[in-house]
Amino acid sequence: MSAVTVFVPKDAAAVSVGADDVAIALSQEAQSRGIEINLIRNGSRGLLWLEPLVEVETSSGRFAFGPVSVSDISGLFDAGFLSGGDHDLGHGLTEEIPYLANQERLTFARCGVIDPLDLTAYESHGGLVGLKKALERESSAIVEDVTVSGLRGRGGAGFPAGIKWETVRKESADQKYICCNADEGDSGTFADRMLMEGDPFTLLEGMVIAGRAVGADTGYIYIRSEYPHAIRALNEAISIFEQANLLGQNILGSGLAFTIHIRIGGGAYICGEESSMLESLEGKRGQVRAKPPIPAISGLFGKPTVVNNVLTLATVPYVLASGGKTYSEYGQGKSRGTQPFQLAGDIARGGLVEKAFGVTLRELVEGFGGGTRSGRPVRTAQVGGPLGAYIPETAFNVDMDYESLAESGAMLGHGGVVVFNESVDMARQARFAMEFCEIESCGKCTPCRIGSVRGKETLDKIIVGEDLEKNLAVLDDLCVLMTDGSLCAMGGLTPMPVTSALKHFPEDFGLARQAAE
């Protein structure tokens, strides 16, 4: 009897709830029973409420069991789980779990499916097809394909990737750079981390393609220090790519040279802003640069630079492999392709959901997320990170795309969705936004540096009911000033959660609802 292949994730989220211990216990139990198993440590599928999610490969497909703890191991073997036997923790075929089956996984197609550092498995699941096609094409044709795809920045700004690439491509310079912004700091977001840990090769492949497209020979991945597992995975992946002649000089005999370096951030949220990130990469204090010039013209060390988020660059291999037109067939309006949404907060089934743009917030929170974990009614969800708007449950039918959210006074951001139940105090959430800005501001511009402090102080007065009308007027003035006068989105977007909380939940600020409407 051949060895049965068993998958146990080594993703940080799975490890945090005991995946390493489960993997050891599985091996020991199999050995004690004289059963040979082939244990593979894969990435996470993103069904985080089921982690550690153990999968078993059978002739019918991969069967899922979870969440598995060490105490469950003996019972799983007794139930014949290695052949897909019935057990209380069983969920049937992994691909048929509704949460997963109802997604459109393009960027995350391999995540949780393979050993993240197995290059042979990566290729057998479609990896390197995009790169090989790119090496056979002119740079202008590569950029054109990215432009046709409609791919936009997945870091929050939503700027068309093709336009940014074409700007850098046309610049005449002795040096150009590709910078991957992996400083994922928004509350409730984890897609970048999950991909870097679960499918790092696809990010590296995307960066090499970008280098080929714009004429850059050097890439940097700026990753937050709080991601040690991702840093380790990327360093190992780079080494494997170098050994396979997929990085370095004369890649695959094409004449293309490209190297990738890892740089670890110092823990500043503001370095998620592209110009602050570039300052930090240059060894300076992470502060926002005034624009113009834009990084595409004068970026890292004053050279033309492509700055893209992890998910943007990791989507490029699919675009090149399948064609820009194919990718553009997903989504709606000017929001093309798919977005990895991350469900967090008080939610029954938290995790990653990759869907084409146009899925509603209600479908995400109620359909995929299953409502609140606490069982209490949903009151609101904050979409787009700590600087995103609070959307009331009554408005959950909004389409999740750039334009629809903007029309409703919200933003997509990095795709994070944090759910709050009826117990949340929205005045205190508004205060948190100002306090967050106060702590994380780079301090360069006055509206952000001082406005956030005054905003927090004013909200403290509002919360205790002090001179309500006067202080609400002051808060309104501060929000306008920060929105219009801040150098970057840190101060410019801080008013969004404040004003949305005021608009939709005036009663939490001591106001009658009809007065605010």
Image (cartoon, helix red, strand yellow):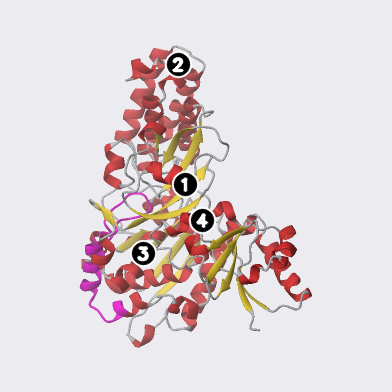
Residue under the image location 60 percent in, 68 percent down: 84
Q: Tag 3: residue type?
A: Thr
- In the rendered image, residue 26, in percent from the top left (x then y), is placed at 70, 68
Instruction: Give the vertical position of 326 relative to 185 (above or below).
Output: below
Q: Nearer the viewer, residue 329 or 494?
A: 329
Tell me the SS state at disc 4: loop
According to the image, label 3 marks what residue?
315
Mark positioned earlier in the residue sequence (3 or 1): 1
According to the image, label 2 marks what residue?
510
Mark positioned earlier in the residue sequence (2 or 1): 1
Report, in whole angstroms, how far the alpha carbon at label 1 lies from the one at label 4: 12 Å
What is the residue that sits farthest to the front in this orientation?
86
Instruction: Read off the magenta span.
Output: 133-162
Q: Tag 1: residue type?
A: Asp
Are dots 3 and 4 in contact, CB under 8 Å?
Answer: no
Report, in whole angstroms, how far the alpha carbon at label 4 lies from the one at label 2: 40 Å
Within 10 Å of the Cα at label 1, are there few (<14), some (14-19), or many (20+) other Cα atoms? some
**Position of residue 15 in the picture relative to residue 116 (left or right):** right
Report, in whole angstroms, how far the alpha carbon at label 2 lies from the one at label 1: 29 Å
- In the rendered image, residue 425, in percent from the top left (x then y), is placed at 51, 26
Asked whether 151 falls inside the magenta stretch, the response is: yes
Report, in whole angstroms, how far the alpha carbon at label 3 lies from the one at label 4: 21 Å
Decide if residue 169 is in sight here.
Answer: no
According to the image, label 1 marks what residue?
186
Instruction: Give the vertical position of 282 relative to 35 (above or below).
Output: above
Mark positioned earlier in the residue sequence (3 or 2): 3
Within 10 Å of the Cα at label 3, are there few (<14), some (14-19), or many (20+) other Cα atoms? many
